[in-house]
Amino acid sequence: MTRSEFKFAYLQPLFADVEQLRGEGAYRQLPAPQPSSSLATDDAPLGMYSASTLIRNSYSAGVAHADALRRLVHAGEVDPQSPWTLMRGALENFATAVWILSGNDRTERCRRTLALWREDMRNRAQHEEDTDHQPGPGGKTGRERRQDIADLALSLGIPTASLSKPEAGKIIGEAAEDAVLNAREVSAAWRAASGFAHGRYWPNLRASMPIEAVRSGPDHYLMALVIDEDQHRPLTRHTRTLLHRLHDRYVPGQGHSPLTTQRSPSGADDSQRFRARSSVRPSRRGRCRRRRGGRPGRCRVGRRRRRPGRRGRGGGVASRVARGSSSPCRSRRAARPGSL
């Protein structure tokens, strides 16, 4: 399929986000948790099996999948299946990170984290058995680490029975609800993408567009298919919403976000739109409120009194607040847990 046949304007907002996250030889990472943050407190009892490691790894994997689609589209090599598979990889990873962060309390967030780590180690154990791999001196097998995770959970008051394999559909549905999306619509788009990824037949009929059919037998036809953009568009929109929700959930209190504010085609400020939906209250750092009626108000920054200055148009005291800044983390990959 040539580039001229594929009208990919609906992908541009997501591609613009991804282009911001491209560094020199690596993608720009989420910053490490600040020591005083809630996420760092979540991580503290988990040791090498931290929530932030899984979140940052899922984020990087999601960005890489979205960027692979961007490069494919710009090369003009778009087929009916690959865009679905790549967008599915991005959506699943962003949803997983949102799911970890959206637990109702610290115990639930730790439970979700350990459940994902335990499934990770189950897959690792399977690979070790398939390849006859043995860990080096002092190392542990995936099977041994699964037991360590179960023991850690019990020490935190988390029953081992609650660490069953997290189902992808459940993760995506709950993450969608946290991002104020229709969970049913997100799940439907994800199932179509998964069908393409696994070579199922039905998505070709439900989510592709036939452009030609040739009879190949009495009851058989060969069809030429192209991607149905009207079907792929919602998946793209859901994926981008989850990416922004991840930033809203993760970045407050962690430092500067590698993803800056983007404007939607309608002119709306997307980051503000998503932040308004967030249950995480944004930091008040750098915000100064002026009381009405020309009376000096209190500066909410550090609870200090506002210094007298020139009067603004409304008669209130004008002041300037220095905003803290920090450069985005440009490490090549998220921190890895110990000698996993």
Image (cartoon, grey):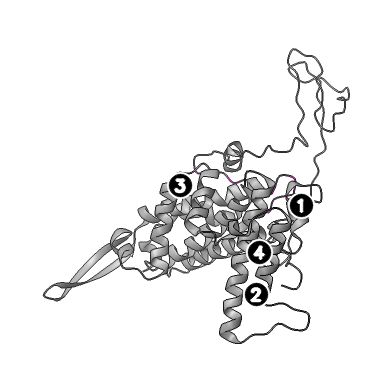
Quadrant of the image containing the N terminus: bottom left
Tell me how far mark 1 sits from mark 3, CA to CA. 29 Å
Q: Which residue is mark 3?
A: 183
Residue 301 position, x and y percent, is 82, 32
Q: Does residue 309 appear to the left or right of 159 in the view shown?
A: right
Q: Earlier in the sequence, mark 1 or mark 3?
A: 1
Q: Which residue is mark 1?
A: 40
Q: Earlier in the sequence, mark 3 or mark 4?
A: 4
Tell me how far mark 1 sits from mark 2, CA to CA. 25 Å
Tell me how far mark 3 sits from mark 4, CA to CA. 29 Å
Residue kind at label 4, given as amino acid type: Tyr
Tell me how far mark 1 sits from mark 4, CA to CA. 23 Å
Q: Are marks 4 and 2 in contact (CB under 8 Å)?
A: no
Residue 113 position, x and y percent, is 65, 57
Residue 310 position, x and y percent, is 84, 22
Residue kind at label 1, given as amino acid type: Ala
Please tell me whether mark 1 or mark 2 is closer to you in this view: 2
Q: Main secondary structure of the magenta part?
A: loop
